[in-house]
């Protein structure tokens, strides 16, 4: 609840009148209010305040180390273990709490489970898994969440795309070189980026909670864009030119190591399932999303066709 997505979730929960209990590994971040109560936990040492489950009906799990750090062999273990250990500790706490009121768990997941492809369009029914470190992580993550079904809970998994926010995540990192006139697309620039505005991401979690939805849901906006188009749209909002040629894969691999994979992987992912469950996106195209984030009055309608810019490349 203190990270990027958690903070937005708490804000929207309070707007709707929902009280929030949250877990933190940092004791200095524990707050005690009538609608916002913090509790300490440490998944690495299996320590958790058992009172955290009091009055709780839905668990939203966002725990997991950032993937936006260099993937050394040791850090790869941190990425995986932080996701598995946190879920194991939550499961153990539920098993030990005889009178808990929890009925469902909604866990973050990632679209990184889908195979890298320039042509495929992925729905939640896709059975193939990306042959990569991320594919392995997400598979283990989701399998661990499924164990909560044995406790009688409704289980939902939210496969999150590229989160658009100026407060953290990928966007500030993508915008930084553009601000200093050294921005460029990665590789061919043709790889698909299935993105989502931070507000819609929190909205999807709460929609799933409200309507007690079960299963896997993609948390991506209806209109993915290519990396080249995304970089151009960011540059427009920052009012900066793109002066450089595209950055070759080998250059980023030298700089970032294995982590460079996430810059070049292509996943074009469908949002149809959550829309069919009644979720309405506030930001369905990248032009409107970035205009909101950067507080710009942008024209998001094609001057010739008068049609809102949607699928762009």
Image (cartoon, rainbow, N blue to C red):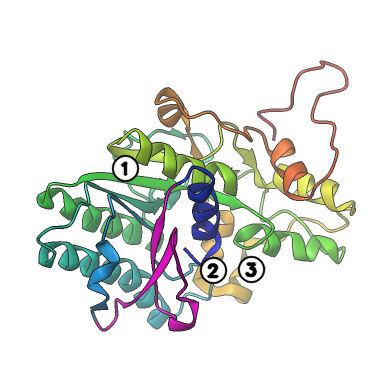
Label 3: few (<14), some or many (≥20) within 10 Å? some
Kindly indicate the quadrant of the structure image that contains residue 82.
Answer: bottom left
Could you tell me residue 150's position as x and y percent?
Answer: 10, 51
Determine whether 45 is above or below 16 in the image. below
Residue 32 painted magenta = yes
Distance (Cα) linking label 2 and label 1? 24 Å
Could you tell me residue 112's position as x and y percent?
Answer: 43, 52
Q: In this view of the protein, can residue 98 be seen by the observer?
A: yes
Total count of labels: 3
Report which residue position mark 3 lands on. 252
* 152 vs 189, nearest the viewer: 152
Position of the C terminus, as image quadrant, is: top right
SS assignment at label 1: loop
Label 2: few (<14), some or many (≥20) within 10 Å? few
Mark closer to the chain start, 2 or 1? 2
Residue 170 painted magenta = no
Mark closer to the chain start, 1 or 3? 1
SS assignment at label 2: loop
Question: Residue at left 73%, top 36%?
Answer: 288
Residue farthest along the front direction in this orientation: 34
Question: Residue at left 54%, top 68%?
Answer: 68
Label 1: few (<14), some or many (≥20) within 10 Å? few
Return the mark for residue 68.
2
* 9 vs 292, nearest the viewer: 9
* 145 vs 50, nearest the viewer: 50
Report which residue position mark 1 lands on. 128
Mark closer to the chain start, 3 or 2? 2
SS assignment at label 3: helix
Question: Residue at left 44%, top 58%?
Answer: 35
Identify the magenta region. 18-45
Could you tell me residue 19's position as x and y percent?
Answer: 41, 53
Determine whether 88 is above or below 313 in the image. below
């Amino acid at each position: 609840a203190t990270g990027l997505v958690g903070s937005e979730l708490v804000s929207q929960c309070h707007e709707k009148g929902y009280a929030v209990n949250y877990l933190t590994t940092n004791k200095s971040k524990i707050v005690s209010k009538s609608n916002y109560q913090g509790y300490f936990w440490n998944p690495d040492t299996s320590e958790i305040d058992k009172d955290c489950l009091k009055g709780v009906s839905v668990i939203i799990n966002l725990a997991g180390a950032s993937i936006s750090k260099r993937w050394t062999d040791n850090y790869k273990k941190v990425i995986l273990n932080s996701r598995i250990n946190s879920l194991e500790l939550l499961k153990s706490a539920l098993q030990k709490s005889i009178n808990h009121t929890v009925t469902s768990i909604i866990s973050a997941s990632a679209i990184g489970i889908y195979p890298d492809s320039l042509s495929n369009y992925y729905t939640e029914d896709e059975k193939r898994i990306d042959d990569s470190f991320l594919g392995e992580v997400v598979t283990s993550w989701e399998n661990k969440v499924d164990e909560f079904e044995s406790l009688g809970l409704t289980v939902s998994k939210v496969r999150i795309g590229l989160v658009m926010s100026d407060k953290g995540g990928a966007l500030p990192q993508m915008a930084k070189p553009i601000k200093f006139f050294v921005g460029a697309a990665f590789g061919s620039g043709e790889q698909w980026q299935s993105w989502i505005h931070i507000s819609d991401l929190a909205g999807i979690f709460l929609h799933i909670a409200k309507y007690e939805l079960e299963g896997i849901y993609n948390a991506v906006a209806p209109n993915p864009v290519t990396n080249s188009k995304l970089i151009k749209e960011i540059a427009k909002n920052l009012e900066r030119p793109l002066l450089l040629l595209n950055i070759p894969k080998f250059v980023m691999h030298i700089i970032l190591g294995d982590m460079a994979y996430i810059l070049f992987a292509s996943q074009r992912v469908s949002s149809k399932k959550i829309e069919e469950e009644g979720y309405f996106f506030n930001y369905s195209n990248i032009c409107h999303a970035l205009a909101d984030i950067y507080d710009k009055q942008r024209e998001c309608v094609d001057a010739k066709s008068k049609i809102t810019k949607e699928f762009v490349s």
